[in-house]
Amino acid sequence: MKKLFLIIEHKVIRRFLYVFFYICYKLKLKNAFFVFFYIYIKFQINYKKIKYRNSKNLPIVLTFWRQSFLKDQLNLYSSKSINLIMIKPYVWATYTRVFYPKYMRGQIKYHLTNDETSNKIKKDVENFIYTVLKKLNNRNTVDGFVFGNVDYMEHQSWAGAAKRLDIPVVVLMCEGFFTKYWYERFINQDHFLNKTKFIYDKVFVPGNTSKNLAYEANIAEKKDIVVTGYPRTDTTFEILQKSMSIDFEKKNLIVLIAFNEPNYFSDNLWNEVLEKFINLCKDNKNLDFLIKTKKDTLTEEILERLTVEDKQMPNLKISHKIDIAEISNNLKVVISFASTFLIEMMSSEIPLLVPIWDDGMKSYSSGATYFDLENKSVTYTFSPNELDLEFYKLINGNVKKLSDDERNNLRLKRDKYIEPYLYKIDGKRTEFVSKEIIKLIK
């Protein structure tokens, strides 16, 4: 049913909207454009009142649905402090095609087209949106905006119009933290080096590393960059807190977070870790093993390398689709290298094994990982044999049970590890972000 609706949404509704938006924009039918958005927003407001049985008149904050921002948006959607309304891609992506010529469309292209003709197009779009947004604001259907990144072109006209109307616009940077290597790549993009002027009131970032990143990339002044953490981590926190109440001895799932990508600069390490993981799977048929990948192509790449016998092992699964909620209660050990998943796992007491040898150590030295070898809140393994040894220590219960003081010390070390990247993982980030937005709404 869901698949059918998506087909209708993309094949039928989008085509209809394209014609509608084209006529509205070319004939300057701003009232028709306003009526569409007024009905679209009011429908969602009333739907949420019925679904959540909430009659309170919360501030209405608009956002553009984006896959990279979706986990944060879904948590903000359930906030009891703001009424988040999501504008779907079949709406915003469709009118973008009408408003902007093809050469201008694109996250970076938009900001690099500053000739006289392009600037006029941008201004014409902003003026069109301004009239519509003013009417929406007067009808109490928009009090603010929250976007997933500073440089998505689809946000610019709405942000510019909102600025003229004193409607607050904030960005929660979904590209918020990087390793040292990718940090440099990010801030040296052309539109940042050109000191593009962004027009948002505040930029929310997940930690101090991303605060520095936003400042160095000329995204905002330091006074306008607020460290908030990520709403998405509230879900992780809740899931992991529940899983920690389950006896470690009763769990039997071993997870390897795949790093079979060139961006990690550790091909040799990956090859050896994969081989070791498969052997552990063969030798421990009483345990379940999962290789979690980022996307389907990376899953296929691993499957192509395995033998027929390996792929048929009943206790091995390889997938990019599995969510942490599906596996958390059975999660015994995580093996990971340079993964953001590793940082989120720091909010638990789950044993974390980090393989780091050969080109993995070179990757660490070049700044392409999140590691800090001085922080002993994870177990670093410096050879295949050491990985084997530490794994069996955990599985056979040869690791002594931590005292309360030792557990508190582990918690402090892991919190210190988390802080530069995700500030806090404490289940309170959604409401913190919501309240920071409310502060800006007059």
Image: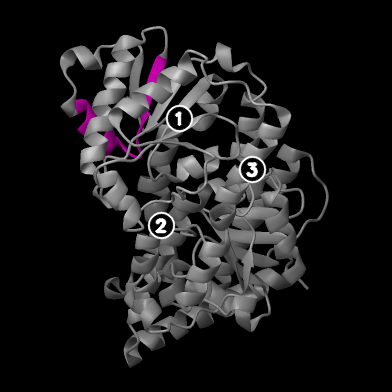
Q: Which mark is residue 334?
A: 1
Residue 411 vs 313, above or below: the answer is: below
Question: As drawn, is 422 to the left or to the right of 267?
Answer: right
* Amino acid at circle 2: Thr
**Are discs 2 and 3 less than 8 Å apart at CB?**
no
- Residue drawn at the location 81% of the way across and 55% of the way down: 57
- Mark 3 surroundings within 10 Å by alpha-carbon count, few (fewer than 14), some (14 through 19), many (20 or more): many
Marked residue nearer the N-terminal end (2 or 3): 2
Secondary-structure class at tag 3: helix
- Residue denoted by label 2: 179
Q: Quadrant of residue 51?
A: top right
- Residue drawn at the location 36% of the way across and 8% of the way down: 285
- Mark 2 surroundings within 10 Å by alpha-carbon count, few (fewer than 14), some (14 through 19), many (20 or more): some
Q: Is residue 294 magenta?
A: yes
Tell me, yes or no, if residue 35 can be seen here.
no
- Mark 1 surroundings within 10 Å by alpha-carbon count, few (fewer than 14), some (14 through 19), many (20 or more): many
Indicate the quadrant containing the C terminus: top left, top right, bottom left or bottom right.
bottom right
Q: Is residue 298 magenta?
A: yes
Residue 343 vs 419, above or below: the answer is: above
Q: Position of residue 218 (x, y in %)?
A: 47, 79
Specify start and end residues of the magenta stretch as a single range. 288-303
Secondary-structure class at tag 1: strand
* Amino acid at circle 1: Val
Q: Which mark is residue 359?
A: none
Secondary-structure class at tag 2: loop
Q: Position of residue 70 (x, y in %)?
A: 52, 48
Q: Quadrant of residue 334?
A: top left
Q: Which mark is residue 234?
A: 3
Indicate the quadrant containing the N terminus: top left, top right, bottom left or bottom right.
top left
Give me the C-alpha separation between circle 2 and circle 3.
23 Å
Give me the C-alpha separation between circle 3 and circle 1.
20 Å
Give me the C-alpha separation between circle 2 and circle 1.
20 Å
